Image: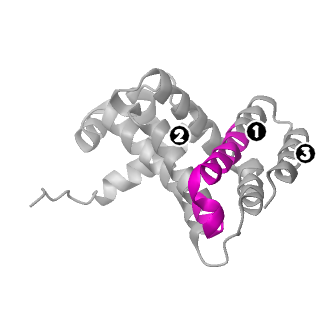
Amino acid sequence: MSPRVAAPSARQTELLEAAYRYVLAHGLAGLSLRPLATAVGSSPRVLLFLFGTKDGLVRALLARARADELALLDDLRRAGRPVGLAPAVERVWTWLAAAEHRPLLRLWGEAYGRSLVEPGGAWAGFARATVDDWLDVLAACQPRPERDGEDGAARRTLALAVLRGALLDLLATDDEQRVTAAVRHQLVLLGG
């Protein structure tokens, strides 16, 4: 029998949501507990009590950000989802390119990069988990015969690479029109 994990308290949930809004605005680089605690109406001691360590808080914040990402992915898994990689990529890109999602996407980019250069601690597995999540969703959007085999996996990987590269370019330049045109051009090449 595995140990039971206690559900977060209402206060822990409230502080996590406030801290999440804070890191969406300020990022995780150089995150310090004292300014964060002040901004969320708490104290460093309470944050450490609720989340164990600063790494525990960062892990909780990454999980919270990933929940927003997974909500989009779950939407693609539901009935009526796009069939084929090109329609799926188009739908995902429309969501990614929306200006209101930039804070979340900057946080994702920061966490993804930190996971690559600091593979332990709070960042452990973040980049790999997001790649796996996206590839699973893209596979579900491929028709059955296309999804199986090396070619289907290669096409999903290419689609993900296009999305990830376009996202990084968009975050770096804020040139939505140019980057969206490039994604649409690649969709023609990607086909259904």
Q: Is residue 154 above or below residue 152?
A: above
Write down the residue under mark 1: 166
Q: Label 2 vs label 1: CA separation?
A: 26 Å
Nearest to the observer: residue 88 or residue 8: 88
Q: Earlier in the sequence, mark 3 or mark 1?
A: 1
Measured in 3D between alpha carbons, the distance from the residue under mark 2 to the one under mark 3, in whole angstroms, is 33 Å
x and y percent of residue 65 in the render?
51, 47
Is 110 left, or right, of 95 in this rendering?
Answer: left
Whether pointer 3 and pointer 1 mark residues with C-beta atoms closer than 8 Å, the reply is: no
The image position of residue 119, as x and y in percent, is: 40, 26
Label 2 neighbour load within 10 Å: few <14, some 14-19, many 20+: some
Q: Residue furthest bottom?
A: 79
Give the side of residue 93 with respect to residue 152, left or right. Answer: right
Residue at the disc numbered 2: 22
Query: Which residue: 40% across, 54% down?
Result: 14
Q: In the rendered image, which quarter contains the C terminus?
A: bottom right
Secondary structure beneath label 2: helix
Q: CA distance from mark 3 to mark 1?
A: 10 Å
Instruction: Classify 10 Å Cα crowding around label 3: few (below 14), some (14-19), many (20 and above).
Output: few
Q: Identify the mark at residue 181; answer none if there is no mark.
A: 3
- Give the amino acid at mark 3: Ala
Q: Say left or right for 7 vs 156.
A: left
Q: Is residue 159 magenta?
A: yes
Task: Estimate the x, y position of residue 101 in percent, counting from the top left.
Answer: 68, 49
Lower position in the chain sequence, tag 2 or tag 1:
2
Return the residue nearer the eye: 120 or 55: 120
The magenta span reads: 139-164
Which amino acid does the dot numbered 1 rest on? Answer: Ala
